[in-house]
Amino acid sequence: MASFKPTKVQTYPKLGEKVTEDALYWKNYKAPVQIKEFGAVTRIEFSPLPPHNYVVTASTRIQVYGPHSQEPLRSFTRFRDTAYGGSFRSDGKLLVAGSEEGIIRLFDISGRVALRQFAGHSKAVHVASFLSDGFRVVSGSDDLSCRMWDVASSTELSSYTEHTDYIRAAAISRLNPDLFITGSYDHTVKVFDARLGGSVMTLQHGHPVESVLLYPSEALLVSTGGRYVKVWDLLKGGQQLVSLKNHHKTVTCACLSTTDNRLLTGSLDRHVKVYNSSYKVVHSFDYAASILSLAVAPEDEVVAVGMTNGVLSVRHRKHSEDKQETVGRKRRGPAYRMFVKGKNYVPKQDDFVVSKTIKQHLQKYDKQLKSFQVSKALDTALQVNPDVTIAVMMELNRRGTLRNALAGRDEKSLTTLLQFLLKHITDSRFSRLLMMVADIIIELYYQVIPQAPIVERLLQRLMEVLGREAELQQELLQVLGVLDTLFASLTPRKEVMVPREERVTRNWLLERK
Amino acid sequence: MVEQTDIRVVRCGGSKICFSTPILTNDSRFLICASGDSVKVFSTRTEECVHVLHGHANQVTGVALNPANHLQVYSCSLDGTVRLWDFIDGILIKTFTVGYKISSIYVSNKHIGVIFIILPMQSNENGEHFQLVAVRLPSALEQELEARELSAVLSDVSPVPACTAFGQGGDYIASAKGLQLCVYFFRKQKTYRFKLKATDKKGARNAFTCVACHPKDDCIATGHQDGKIRLWRNFNQKKEYTYSTQHWHHNAVSALCFSPEGMHLLSGGVESVLVQWHCKEVNKKNFLPRLGGAIAHICVSPDGQMYSTSHTNNKITIISSFRVSAVIQGLVKGGSVQTDLMIDPRTKALVLNGKPGHLQFYSLERDKQLYSLDIVQQEYIYQAGLDQFEVVKAALDGTASWLATVEQRGSKISSLEFSLKLWSFNEKAQSFELNTTITAPHQNMITAMCFSPAMDTTMLVTVAKDDQFKVWLLGSDLDEQKKQASWSCEHLGSYHGLQPTNCCFSGDGSLLAVSFAEVVTLWSPDTWELLTTLCQPPGTIEDLCFGRLSCSKYLLGTTTKNLLCWNLLTCALEWSTSMDVCVLRTDPLSENVAAFCHNSGKTDLFVFRPSEPRPLFTQKAVCVGRVQRCIFVPREDPLDSCDEWSQWLNRSRLHFLTEQMELLTFSTRAEDERILNSRKELLVDDSVAMTPFYLLLGKHRQQQQEKQTSVPSQAADRAQLPQGCVAIRELLHTPAHVLPPASFLCSVFLNSLLISNTGGRDEKELPEQEVDSEKEEVDSEEEMEMNNGPQGVRTQGSVGEAPPSLSRAEEKELRRLRKTDFSWVTSLTSS
């Protein structure tokens, strides 16, 4: 006696994009923590030293947050006007920031008052950064100049005025202390060598450059501006590698994740996009406002995003330990050990084994199908997800009892059935079966439909939906026809080979006689 | 023509075991059933076939236990004979020739020496009307007897065996036909007839389908066309009979049977549910559902402990204490084999579609179903006229690591549902596992499919009626968190909107041939480029195959009228011959091709090589009607026939299925002889269960018997070696309370030790030893006295001299000594 075979619920392939490993990795963040700042958050930078505090520049303040704190650990408020571009030295102890009034200030991370002030720029300084030797600061300003300052003497070492518009982006080389890169609104990115006293390379971005970024290998340079993100190969003399146009609005910031060097870009279109190594978007974060700044902590622990509305949004990475903890707290009831008690006992040689039949667990609709209660099975299946409903309908159709299951229903159960039809009848995977169901329903109930206004209304809606679908299909067929003619004119013709006249005919039956 | 005579067409297993009601023997150990033109005896416990009783020349139609001797069985056949067999030993005892086609047999305890059979009426020989006759069996001693003492009992009866039954110890016999029930009382010699109306207001269909009589009570149960069961009482008078009606079955009741004590009534039908009705409490029923296959017959063992149900899908289920205890499954043959015949290279089993939604693996050598693979994986509803999923196509790849199946439901395109499934072989579980399901792989039904034989790629080509062929490839990308590789469509090809009919890969997988109506197209599987087209009108190409090995440059095709052979090097037709080929198959191990040609109602076989002008073998009229399928089955051990006509059978056998779904094969004379020899060896039967007790005592008794008969066979002696060890182990491990007395065990124990010693000395000498052991046993007395002298000689010899210097006589002496030495010790132990 074979056991009852349960209804096979088909798994339909998920439509849309595939779930990749990257997507799973980037999805694995907790809900963002929102911190309200005083103005638009223009820059975020993580300290290179653990515990990887981060500095946030917003309005007239520069604030340092710990990785898990929602309150600033420290804040530098001695700015008369808006502060810009707060950034750490490579040892994480000093901090440099430009400002609207053109003065660059240098802070000790544990102090409060500026240690040095570099004055010389005539307009706002949007970027300031330490060179990798740690003794010099480079700054880019709206007065079209880019200057280098000595920290020890707080004097200006040199000034470069090669850009013809505001300088709004800078990146320094970590391998060479004399090398830095600036991006400007004059659509160019320039690579400067302090030893030569001028630019050594100029890259045409084509749009006002909002940010520049160097890969850790320093062979690749990323520049963002306009809707474009461009990647340049510096070792090939500044050849453009790719140009990405995945944002709808200006791309304001870019950063690299530390694992696998994934590129992240933030834009005014309120999205942060994550690219894989072949520069395909693998994931995208949505935010409430336009994004101005973006930073990722080492090991991708934290993704911090600053927005125009002054909100700093911080996402922390989920860890498996956290999950276990929550489960442990929630768990009630008997332990797993209790259920496996005695189940994994291996009988000894002289033990007498009494086998116990394992009871087959069936779903409720399967139980009803087993006892041929077709109407009830359909009712049960309608309460589960559509895949199951379709599977049960198919099973009923196969058994030839679909009509019986649909017949004899009251207004309420007919309404749920019709609502299901309305929702799924245009799905091409289900439509064939559901059309049949709809046919049967109309055939069964057409005499009594006028008595139930709700059912009548639903049927009218069904007709509308189907009419729209038919129109759509017709249009698609027209397009298909056009495409067919195009393809047919492209393919070369091949002729059927004409059989030759000479052939050898053998008749075995004759030969054998 | 003369040489051909030693190749003949033989039936090779797969005959129906559900043709007639089987019987269970008195001790419930054996089940006897008719199977084709032989009677088979199965063990109810092990499901193994114990004996095959050959002798009848036509279909056996019924079996019945001899009421006078419960170890004998009658069988009747369409060849007009009734035979009496001893089923324990498998011996034919007597043959009674009746001379008419017998369609069933009945016996009763009251009528010893008389059997009741159903024969066609002499008046019309075309077999429309039948009568029940009593045959008095002559009691002469000869083996072959003529039974001429016929006396008619009832005329115009149904030829269906289930429609007639003996009642209450043989007082009366009841028979139903159409709408009429006849009861004949032997004592009164009177017949009562009861009629039912064909239909009533509720549309009941009242025709009788089967009859059963209560063994202890005057009660007849009848089954009807609409699933009703009527219990008739008080039927020994014309007017005042009564009946009560029970209704559970929704379709015709096909089998009814009372338990021997009359407590229960068993019924079965197409629903595949065995229903047990309680005779005392009318409304109480027990069910045994999902037995797998419509029930055709039910039988109960004489002690009532065991039931057996025969199912139409060639299966017998044995039920003890209302639970399935054993299943005897034959080759399932539906109306047609929709999947092609295939050979599983692993098990050497024939693969074809079996019970609904399953693929069966059938061992040709053992004539037994190995297992059946559930393809559809849906609950099969046993209901007449229901259109359910069937496996319509199946293909195995070269190493049988992949299996592709197509299941289909509905025949019209609007209601057509079909899916392609791909199964991978799981080495650990030793069975096929579902890998990929593709629902609706084409717009219309698939007509052919084949795997690529190339080693490096796993590729499947399907050809469908939607004017396209599709190429499916096993995905190689294992990265994206998928554990298993799955199949996906690689290429979609079509040719001028013509409907493809068949497809075939060349032997090395470098070419794909797809036939589109009258045109054969050749494609390169690497680039999917159309290489060339071959065309030979008129007629649609039906079958396609490439030549093998040295003939691989040829492509063979069949149309309705012609057999065509193209040379692929010249891309031209090499030769053609006009014949109506039904099936074309190549032998995988040689260049041979078999073609079955339909010719005026008969089928002829041609075996040929594409390169040679003359066929290797032809046989006219191998069977009546068209051949459905055929297959070359590789042999385990090749024959070494050098005969020109039978050489093609050396590497593989050719099996084919006829229109009547008979599985036939070709056999040479040498093979027949070999089979005959092997059959004799097989007769050694161990029907006693292997219990620890048997190991200790049964073997001991056997040894004793062997000693008494003094024919110690070589095999028995050898077997004692491991057996001795087993005896010791069993002795130590068996609980003390089940052990026989120690005096018994002591000698067995010691014996086992001693024998293991002699056997351990050297195995090579054993055969010769046995030869003269007979002589030795006779004059062992004298040897005892002579013992001392020669023994001394022997020890000296073994130390000083090299063994070859011993003369033959001396050697003999030595062996004798060894033997006597041993028997002397055993005599001590047994005393």
Image (tube, rainbow, N blue to C red):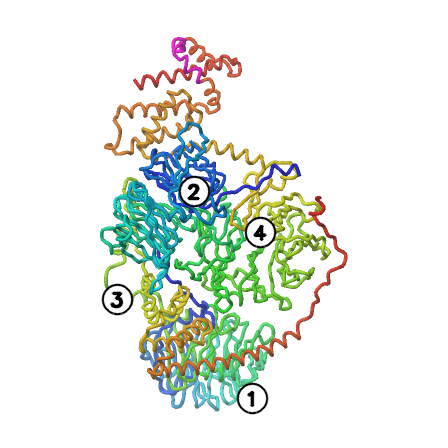
Residue drawn at 37 percent across, 49 percent down: B163
Q: Kindly indicate whether the residue at mark 3 contacts the one at mark 4 (C-beta within 8 angstroms).
A: no
* Three-letter residue code for mark 1: Thr
Q: Please indicate, yes or no, whether residue A133 appears anywhere in the rendered image.
A: no
Label 4, on which residue?
Answer: B626
Task: Please tell me which residue lies in front, B779 or A138.
Answer: B779
The residue stretch that appears in magenta: B773-788
At label 4, counting other C-alpha atoms closer than 10 Å, the crowd grade (few under 14, some 14-19, many 20 or more) is many
Residue at the far right: name it.
A502
Label 1, on which residue?
Answer: A164
Label 2, on which residue?
Answer: B34
Image position, residue A284 (x, y; %):
44, 76
Image vertical order of residue B445 relative to residue B806, above or below: below
Comparing marks 2 and 3, which lies closer to the viewer? 2
Label 3, on which residue?
Answer: A329
Disc 1 from disc 2: Cα separation = 105 Å
**SS of the residue under disc 4:** loop
Q: Mark on residue B590?
A: none
Is disc 1 in the same subunit as disc 2? no
**Chain ID at mark 2:** B
Is disc 1 in the same subunit as disc 3? yes
**Chain ID at mark 4:** B
* Three-letter residue code for mark 2: Ala
Disc 1 from disc 4: Cα separation = 93 Å
Image vertical order of residue B312 relative to residue A119, above or below: above
| Prevailing SS of the magenta stretch | helix
Q: Please indicate, yes or no, whether residue B386 appears anywhere in the rendered image.
A: yes
Disc 4 from disc 3: Cα separation = 74 Å
Q: Earlier in the sequence, mark 1 or mark 3?
A: 1
Image position, residue B801 (x, y; %):
50, 13
**SS of the residue under disc 2:** strand
